[in-house]
Image (cartoon, rainbow, N blue to C red):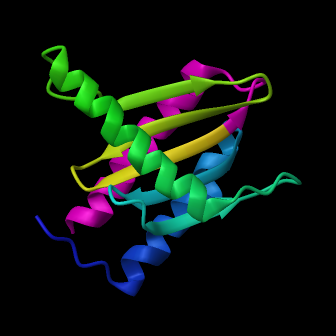
């Protein structure tokens, strides 16, 4: 299914990225398509990331991991999580065409984060499907 995003859709999505997810401790969040194109982004704090590279590599990583899923007999892995010494990345599929990429530090509760991300994805899905 092809999606046409109106300006109001983008503004509503950006509102979620800017106001809802940082409350969970996320300091960088991207909504990208599966080709790595940036749909919306929000970054706070001193650390600045190379957003275009992050988007492209996130899409490639998600694609590679889903190819692995098929090899072991799974349809897909809809959520990925990578833990680092200082920062962590959480990837969540949004519908079939989009990926939500969240970067957060080790002080954030993973359980709370996953709950907030699930709610945000629900809101984003409503916007994309309207």
Residue at x 89% of width, y 54% of height: 46
Q: Depth check: 9 or 39 in front?
A: 39
Depicted 39 relative to depicted 19: above or below? below
96 over 7 or under it: above or below: above
Does the magenta-highlighted stretch encompass residue 88? Answer: no
Residue 120 drawn at (x, y percent) = 45, 47
Residue 67 in percent (x, y) is at 24, 31
Q: In which quarter of the image is residue 84?
A: top right
Which quarter of the image is occupied by the N terminus? bottom left
Q: Which residue lies furthest to the bottom in this view?
A: 7
Left/right placement of residue 56 relative to residue 109 reads: left
Residue 30, can we see it?
no
Residue at (59% x, 35% y) in the render: 89
> Residue 9 versus residue 79: which sits nearer the camera?
79
Residue 8 appears in the picture as rendered:
yes
Residue closer to the observer: 2 or 24: 2
Q: Where is residue 81 in the image (x, y as percent from the top left)?
A: 51, 26
Residue 10: horizontal and vertical position, in percent? 43, 75
Residue, x 29% and y 27% (percent of image)? 77
State the residue in front, 34 or 90. 34
């Amino acid at each position: 299914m092809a999606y046409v995003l109106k300006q109001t859709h983008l503004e509503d999505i950006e509102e979620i990225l800017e106001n809802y997810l940082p409350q969970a401790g996320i300091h960088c969040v991207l909504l990208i398509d599966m080709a790595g194109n940036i749909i919306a982004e929000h970054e706070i704090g001193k650390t600045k990331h190379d957003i275009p590279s992050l988007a492209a590599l996130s899409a490639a990583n998600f694609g590679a991991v889903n190819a692995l899923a098929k090899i072991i007999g799974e349809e897909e892995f809809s959520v990925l999580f990578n833990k680092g010494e200082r920062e962590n990345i959480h990837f969540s599929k949004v519908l079939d065409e989009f990926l939500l990429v969240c970067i957060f530090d080790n002080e954030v509760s993973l359980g709370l984060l996953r709950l907030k991300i699930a709610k945000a994805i629900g809101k984003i899905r409503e916007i994309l499907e309207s």
